[in-house]
Amino acid sequence: MKKILSKVSKISGKPIIPGDKSISHRGLILGALATGTSEVIDILEGEDVQSTAKCLELLGVEIKKSGNKTFIKGIGDKAHFKSDLVLDCGNSGTTMRVMMGVLAGMPITATLTGDSSLIKRPMKRVSAPLLQMGAQFKLTNENFAPLEVHGTKLHGIQYDLKIASAQIKTAIMMAALRAEGETTITGEIGSRDHTERLLPHFGVHLSVTEEKITVRGGQSLKANIVKIPGDPSTAAFWIGAASILPDSDIEMANISLNPTRIGFMQALKRMGAQIEFEETESHPEPVGKIRVKFKELSGGEITKEEVPSLIDEIPLIAILATQARGTTIVRGAEELRVKESDRLLAVATNLQKMGCEIEIYPDGFKIEGPQKLHGATIETFNDHRIAMAFSIAALVASGETTILDAECVAVSYPNFYETLTELSK
């Protein structure tokens, strides 16, 4: 499916933002591992979260939906699985990587696989710490899916995390729950912290400081209710659009204001954006309202330390940089090379098609603004973030912009284009 978009004068309205993808995955998985029936409210309907649900159902977890509530009858400590299961994780790196940790200490033999994009993404970074815990994996070419997991007894370890990845961190914590002794994670632990917030919500005792996370093995999870806030990485597209289209005014409620997830908004405020927050809830996740009005942007700098808190929004930052006055530089974002696509390459390729000059680095880019963009045919590489970012670019570009394979937005925001049409009226 392709979408043809044209320049608009402004966007305005109060869009309802779909549930946070990261918290939706974790709500399902922790509910599945708990004793009792958990309730997840306003879960994201995107394809990635559906991949997690389908994998859990194959493992014998009962998942039923009623209105905006999803009920998960957990397997608790009485896990009895079929052998030789094949679990298709679709396009979802979170599903595959977290399930590696979940299954490593369970009595199961299973194969984890995915679509043509997912099987190209590195998995050794997840298997490495789990192997130290005693896990047994067989990876394709020692780094990729399809991969086999042979569940076995695990033991606690001390692990120094070299990559700021919430997926790896979560996989280790999942495995640690079934391991003997304590597991301590140090190093790059400052990535999004939804797992650290939700595990205590399900009755697990953790020790979390800025320097380390410690999980004691042998703990059981108890069912609970999780209300999923709106996804800030999804809200970012309307925040960004309102920041570059004069007279725009956007209000959004029930958005996650988790400190590890609002780096994009903080960076945009430094660039001059007019963004206001109001926290309305605090537990287990801070949640609140956001209002954005147009205000001319200036260039800015994104450092390696900031990248984990805005990793998903960097393609959008590139679009905004083309309309900001001055120089925008992003460094330390080499992780974008191994996302659903090589997002740095995708950004450079498509911006150049739209007439933009961009200097690309192995770990980022430099853009001088403002630059006039013109319509072009955009190659999304079947990556939802690229499709949505360049749909925002189309709103300020002269002529028509064609977004190829636009259906890939269903991974995280199935109603993206309907909402775009409504806000542009």
Image (cartoon, helix red, strand yellow):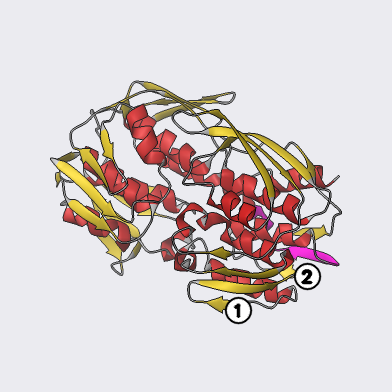
Nearer to me, 269 or 138: 269
**Disc number at residue 359?**
1
Marks counted in the figure total 2
Residue 191 belongs to the span the image colors magenta: no
Is 117 left or right of 269, judged from the image as shown? left
Q: Position of residue 275 (x, y in %)?
A: 67, 45
Relative to 93, is 333 above or below? below
Q: Which amino acid lies under the numbered mark 2 shown in the image of this protein?
A: Leu
Mark 2 surroundings within 10 Å by alpha-carbon count, few (fewer than 14), some (14 through 19), many (20 or more): many
- Identify the residue position indicated by label 2 in the image: 373
Image quadrant occupied by the N terminus: bottom right
Residue drawn where x is 74% and y is 36% of the image: 14
Residue drawn where x is 43% and y is 66% of the image: 120
**Disc number at residue 79?**
none
Nearer to me, 74 or 293: 293
Dot 2: element: loop
Q: Position of residue 259 (x, y in %)?
A: 48, 43
